[in-house]
Image: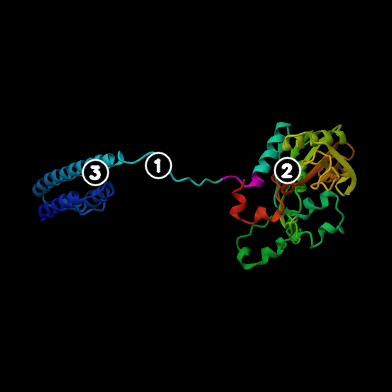
Amino acid sequence: MLKEKIVKIKQEALGAVEKAKNVEEILQLEIQFLGRKSDFVGILRQLKDVSAEEKREVGQLANSVKVEIQTLLEEKKKSLTSTFDAQAEKIDVTIPALKMRQGHLHPLTKIQNEIEDIFTSMGFEIADGPEVEDEFHNFDALNMPKDHPARDMQDTFWLKPQSDIAKTPTNAANKQHDTNKNTDARILLRTHTSNVQIRYMEKHQPPFRIIAPGRIYRNEAGDSTHEHTFHQFEALVVGDEINVGNFKFIAQEFFSKFFKKEIQIRIRPSFFPFTEPSFEFDISCTVCDGKGCSACKQAGWLEIGGAGMVNQNVFVAAGYPSGKYQGFAWGFGMERLAMMKYKIDDIRHFHSGDLRFIKQF
């Protein structure tokens, strides 16, 4: 009975191999007739149930048929491969190939990489922090009063308190309670990357110089120059004898390298709760080099961001003694810098997902 099955499988295999038209069909036939789930292998597994004499006869026949099928498959495969190679020789290699579509970096990623390269070349470290932040690191530690406008709903995305989340049925069973954590603390989507400065100072001692690039969120309506989600860059330098002159030199070096031309820095008095003194800083117009044009409204200067000497209350909140260290902090929006460099007139393009815009960079 088993011999008849083996002979039948051999005949089917020989006929199928003869009709095969390509290598893919040969591979499928190999699986069909000799694979682990094939009828042939199933017959071999039945040998344990037959007599010793029949097992010897069937085994010899099975081995002979297996070798014959394998040999035929290999010969057919070689024949088809050589035929394919002969056909391949007829291909006209001078015909232009189809252009491959390749991905590339987003313009904001390019800007961030360039910023990081420039600052690391000047000895800065890149620091990072959470985008979902608590009120202390986002506001309190930065010397912002409880009634500061930035805490209002029009500027901040406040999130559901952790204590409320713990009460929901889907989380109650899985939540592990940490007695050292205040689950009633208000949490929010960070409104700046200054929270990174506080978290870094809590774990490191001066002197140091860091930059903190990242995504931030503001609860405001979008237009050509404003978005609810955008990217910010901040720099923090802390040591024993840091002054405004250090800031001007580093800022001037950075912008000159970034725009690949000589850039001048101008500072104007301002106010921020986390710096004292505080100032806005401008750079000489990158279009007219400070001579006056439509891009700078004939002023010769472009407003970039805010800066100042770190308020001692911020140092105290981070765990440093008051009056022991000095430092400066400054920052700006990365979209603003990208718009200037690439001549982009609407900030909403960056997050629109429009490939027509992305493919330009």
Viewer-side label of 2, 1: 1
Tell me which label, 3 or 2, sits earlier in the chain.
3
Tell me which label, 2 or 1, sits earlier in the chain.
1
The image position of residue 266, as x and y in percent, is 86, 40
How did the renderer colour the structure?
rainbow
Q: Is residue 64 above or below residue 185?
A: above
Question: Which image quarter is the N terminus in?
Answer: bottom left
Q: Which residue is mark 2?
A: 212
Viewer-side label of 3, 1: 1
Question: Which label is found at residue 80?
Answer: 3
Q: Which residue is mark 1?
A: 95
Say which quarter of the image contains residue 156.
Answer: bottom right
- On screen, residue 18 versus residue 342, left or right, reads left
Marks 3/2 in contact by CB < 8 Å: the verdict is no
Viewer-nearest residue: 129 or 11: 11
Viewer-nearest residue: 196 or 298: 298
Question: Which image quarter is the C terminus in?
Answer: top right
Residue type, mark 1 in image:
Ile
Tell me which label, 3 or 1, sits earlier in the chain.
3
Q: Residue at x 85, y 32 (%)?
A: 240
Say whether residue 67 is visible.
Answer: yes
Is residue 107 in the magenta section? yes
Q: Residue at x 21, y 41 (%)?
A: 79
Label 3: state its secondary structure: helix
